[in-house]
């Protein structure tokens, strides 16, 4: 038993047979330091204008506000759409199933940028055609922020429909039967039994989609004049003839946002999975 324990973590070799040297954490730290040195060397070699970057960083960075508005707004719309779409895909109703399948197929089958342009530029044409009721104008003519939120929500809702569907289907049928045996209605079973457990499967890919939405919000800046992060970097770089520096600022800010939300996503995943792992240990 002692020999068996000694082999753990040593890839099958006895602990005393491991080659001497730096620990894994030290090697990782040195690797990061080497990458940092290379990046600094690249900045120096290509003579990047760091003074210009420091000057324009506050202005470009303020575009994060609109990036977050678009991302949180799009996710707030995508989550209920995904839940309804998943329930429709799982429904025995041919009508609901067909509507859900069409929604998923269309918005997954067309580019997000096309959808943004369609909602922001094409819908207003419909509002002013002869015979179209006037009350439809506020629905069809949207501000770029609302058009972007709508496009992001519809697009990501279609992708997340499959995530929600797989999460719901991961719950064992026996639990549903047990809930019915306790006289729970189908709605109560879904709300109290299925959805709380499905969250453990749904949260990780949903968090990844939110991080992807942070970056895809830049497409809204391409379509309209919203001064989100990418739009500010692009217009400033073009006007000041420093496109590399301004786009580098945008890339660093997107990277930082991704790191922050990845950190909170990992904490949320561990919190949701805590009860599941405890049940596994007790069951074992």
Image (spheres, rainbow, N blue to C red):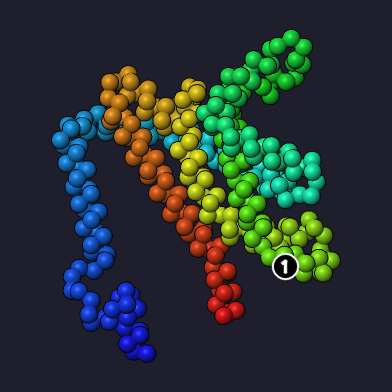
Q: Position of residue 254 (x, y in %)?
A: 39, 40
Q: Position of residue 69 (x, y in %)?
A: 52, 36
Q: Is residue 71 left or right of residue 57?
A: right
Asked which quadrant contains residue 186, the reply is bottom right
Can residue 232 be seen in this snapshot? yes
Q: Position of residue 260 (x, y in %)?
A: 42, 49
Query: Is residue 226 positioned above or below 158 on the image?
Result: above
> Is the N terminus in the top left, top right, bottom left or bottom right quadrant?
bottom left
- Is 209 in front, or is 159? 159
Dot 1: element: helix
Residue at 63% over, 34% down: 106
Q: Is residue 259 left or right of residue 88?
A: left
Asked which quadrant contains residue 166, the reply is bottom right
Residue at 32% over, 24% down: 237
Residue at 58% over, 19% down: 121
Q: Position of residue 36 (x, y in %)?
A: 22, 48
Residue underneath mark 1: 175
Crowd band around label 1 with a 10 angstrom C-alpha radius: few (<14), some (14–19), many (20+) = few
> Is the C terminus in the top left, top right, bottom left or bottom right quadrant?
bottom right
Q: Is residue 131 left or right of residue 221?
A: right
Query: Is residue 256 positioned above or below 25 on the image?
Result: above
Can residue 73 be seen in this snapshot? no
Query: Is residue 281 positioned above or below 83 on the image?
Result: below
Query: Is residue 125 positioned above or below 203 on the image?
Result: above
């Amino acid at each position: 038993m002692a020999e068996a324990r000694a082999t753990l973590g040593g890839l099958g070799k006895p602990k005393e047979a491991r080659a001497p040297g730096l620990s894994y954490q030290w090697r990782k730290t040195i690797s990061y330091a080497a990458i940092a040195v290379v990046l600094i060397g690249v900045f120096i070699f290509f003579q990047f204008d760091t003074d210009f970057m420091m000057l324009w960083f506050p202005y470009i960075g303020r575009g994060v506000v609109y990036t977050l508005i678009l991302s949180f707004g799009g996710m707030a719309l995508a989550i209920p759409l995904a839940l309804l779409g998943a329930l429709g895909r799982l429904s025995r109703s041919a009508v609901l199933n067909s509507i859900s399948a069409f929604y998923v197929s269309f918005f997954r089958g067309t580019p997000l940028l096309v959808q943004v342009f369609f909602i922001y530029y094409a819908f207003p044409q419909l509002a002013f055609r002869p015979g179209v009721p006037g009350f439809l104008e506020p629905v069809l003519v949207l501000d770029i922020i609302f058009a972007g939120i709508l496009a992001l929500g519809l697009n990501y809702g279609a992708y997340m429909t499959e995530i929600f569907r797989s999460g719901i289907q991961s719950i064992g049928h026996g639990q549903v039967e047990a809930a019915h045996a306790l006289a729970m209605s189908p709605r109560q079973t879904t709300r109290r039994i299925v959805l709380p457990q499905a969250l453990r499967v749904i949260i990780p890919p949903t968090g990844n989609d939110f991080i992807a939405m942070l970056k895809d919000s830049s497409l809204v800046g391409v379509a309209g004049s919203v001064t989100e992060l990418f739009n500010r970097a692009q217009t400033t770089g073009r006007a000041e003839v420093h496109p590399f520096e301004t786009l580098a600022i945008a890339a660093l800010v997107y990277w930082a946002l991704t790191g922050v939300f990845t950190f909170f996503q990992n904490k949320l995943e561990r919190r949701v999975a805590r009860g599941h792992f405890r049940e596994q240990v007790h069951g074992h």
